[in-house]
Amino acid sequence: MDQDAVLNEFRATGALLEGHFLLSSGLHSPVYLQCAKVLMDPKRAAKLCAAFAEKLKETGVQVDLVVSPAMGGVIVGYEVARQLGVPGIFTERVDGEFALRRGFEIPSGAKILMMEDIITTGLSSRECIKTITAWGGDVVAAGCLINRSGGRAEVGAPITALATIDAPTYQSEDLPGSLKAIPAVKPGSRGMKA
């Protein structure tokens, strides 16, 4: 599945949006990817995650476990784990920090794929990886359906992305005139960072 085919799946569901968006990171962007709309169709989710699993296999990386950050990574992490034939678990925020709950554990030395839906700045990925390594897991790869950083985000592990786009982001004080003229919408799920 090439990049155009991946983006067409987002367009077909109305999940590739243009306007003025306030991202979870606090940055502004004229592009927003609402991955939950793509993943709400089980057939589409399976198709995208199977394509990702094949792309990961082509890198030669083998994993024992998939760990995703909640909330956005839960569905994609589960489906990628299913495609790879390994267990999948997720981290959740407890008092603002990622933690394992629900009886989840990471065996010491387990080879882990940290799987996200979308990577923008890599903040959630880095926080999830910090939790994984605190449990003794070995993060051998990070994955996402779309890396919207143009490949610039650093998460602490090699990133495999099904598609990579370069969606511009801006600090509030550096907004271009085109965005200043449009009220910002915050479609994401995570609270703002101060």
Image (cartoon, rainbow, N blue to C red):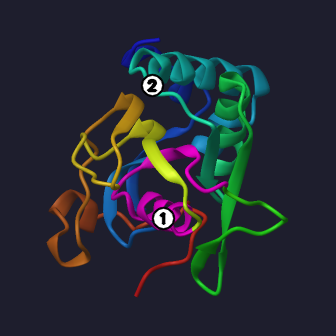
- Mark 2 or 1: the one toward you: 2
How many numbered markers are drawn? Answer: 2
> Going by the picture, which residue comes out furthest to the top?
1
Placement of the C terminus among the 4 image quadrants: bottom left
Q: Does 2 sit above or below residue 34?
A: above
Residue 130 highlighted magenta (yes or no): yes
Q: Residue 184 vs residue 14: left or right?
A: left
Which is more toward the observer, 49 or 18?
49
Going by the numbered disc 1, the residue's amino acid type is Val
Q: Secondary structure at mark 2?
A: helix
Q: Nearer the viewer, residue 38 or 12?
A: 38
* Point 66% across, 59% down: residue: 71
Query: Is 59 placed left or right of 153 in the picture?
Result: right
Residue matched to label 1 = 185
Whole-percent x, y for residue 147 in the image = 37, 40
Of residue 49 and residue 84, the one placed in the foreground of this image is 84
Q: What percent of the width, then of the height, locates residue 108?
A: 60, 56
Give the CA distance from mark 2 to mark 1.
22 Å
- What segment is highlighted magenta in the picture? 107-134
Q: Secondary structure at mark 1?
A: loop
In screen coordinates, is 135 left or right of 75? left
**Does the rendering let one see residue 33?**
no
Can you tell which mark lies on residue 159? none
Question: Residue at position x 42%, y 15% from top?
Answer: 58
- Image location (x, y in percent) of residue 118: 47, 46
Residue at image x 27%, y 61%?
179
Q: Position of residue 27 (x, y in %)?
A: 32, 68
Instruction: Identify the mark nearer the N-term, 2 or 1.
Output: 2
- Is residue 22 placed above or below 17 in the rendered structure? below
Going by the numbered disc 2, the residue's amino acid type is Leu
Q: Which mark is residue 7?
A: 2
